[in-house]
Amino acid sequence: MLMRILGIESSCDETAVSIVENGIKIISTGLASSAEMHAKTGGVIPEQAAREQIKSIIPVLSEVLGDDKNGKNIDAIAVTVGPGLIGSLLVGVETAKTLSYIWDKPIIAVNHLVGHLYANWFKEVPEFPALGLVVSGGHTDLVLMKDHGKMEYIGSTRDDAAGEAFDKTARLLGLPYPGGPNLSKKAQEFLDKNHKPLTLFPRPLSDEDNFEWSFSGLKTAVTREVQNRKVTENDIPEIAAEVQEAIVNSLVSKCVKAILKYEPKSFLLAGGVAANSRLREKFESELTSKDIKVAFHVPEPKLCTDNATYIASCAYFNQSKRDLLEIEANPQLTIQDKV
Ligand code: KG4
Ligand code: ZN
């Protein structure tokens, strides 16, 4: 039987709505971002993000529903309940509850971090067990998915998230918000012309026998480099390439160790940082060169960053329908928390 789920995502500065059929087919999708506004302030101001989302949610919803304003073709509503910014989360959660109430349709709560992994369900359905790495602006989490809803925590960052490391070092280099994609563009300018080994910055914990990361030292290392070298505009692409390589290498080397240890059938890359082309390439080349038998899945770049398609997909495969009065935004959720 066909099941169409309307997903709503508003955990950070995006306001997104999508309709997905049976968890794998995108029927309609829309997104409003306040990134341009945050570019002026150099980062997301939570109060401003939520105010923009309040204004955007109805236009985006209306665009995605098209002629079906009464949700006749929708079977359930899915919404991100956390983690994220409380004001932002509330916009999505209260909209979802209102629709559930007036349309009399079930509501499914989704953990945003688990949701990210489901961006991998739109091309080719991954086989379990699957090892998944979620690399976003606030999280770096490695999990083993034995099945839908059966997740084992493997490791995470001890301090900054991978996306945060991109964003903060980009800022130190004077690059505009959003830092990750802008740093990556600068790095590419260097990589297009140079092929030297990039080993300037440390890869903390790389020799330790665990699945943890630490990225906060990168800021200090970059600050020191900028001061010592008296950096000019010409040096920025090279430093950006070094930063990117340090983050990418740390992520790839630990994940390869985890793949060898847990021997999953699939490896899933997810979250905003998964849009990084160097990271995608490096995983692909490491797994191939080491002849590791695992199916590597990575979503197309626009599905890596926040959007509602994977929220609807995650809800389809994890259908814990709840009374709408029990659904609450929870900014502190971790990837291990059931919702
Ligand atoms: O998953 P996401 O869209 O939002 C959160 O849930 O946090 O991830 C946003 C993060 C930001 O830190 C952003 O700089 C980073 O993903 N990001 C990138 C790239 N695109 C987005 N980092 C490196 N390279 C990219 N191309
Ligand atoms: Zn996200």
Image: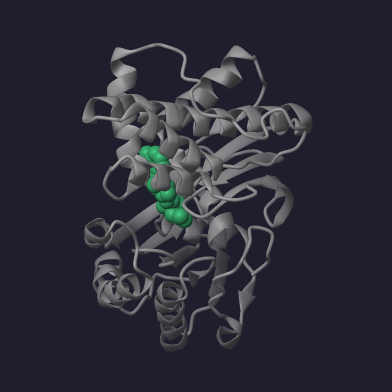
Determine if residue 233 is in view: yes
| Image location of residue 124, percent across then percent down | 52, 37
Relative vertical location of residue 149 with respect to residue 300 in this rendering, above or below: below
Determine if residue 304 is in view: no
| Image location of residue 232, percent across then percent down | 24, 29
| Image location of residue 211, percent across then percent down | 71, 39
Q: Nearer the viewer, residue 329 or 320?
A: 329
Question: Could you tell me which residue is drawn at 77 percent across and 34 percent down?
Answer: 262
Q: Which of 137 and 233 is in front in this view?
A: 233
Question: Could you tell me which residue is drawn at 34 percent across and 68 percent down?
Answer: 45
Screen quadrant of the N terminus: bottom right
| Image location of residue 154, percent across then percent down | 73, 45
Examine the image and state in which quarter residue 205 appears: top right
Examine the image and state in which quarter residue 20 appears: bottom left
Examine the image and state in which quarter residue 207 appears: top right
Q: Nearer the viewer, residue 263 or 29?
A: 263
Question: Could you tell me which residue is drawn at 27 percent across and 57 percent down?
Answer: 35
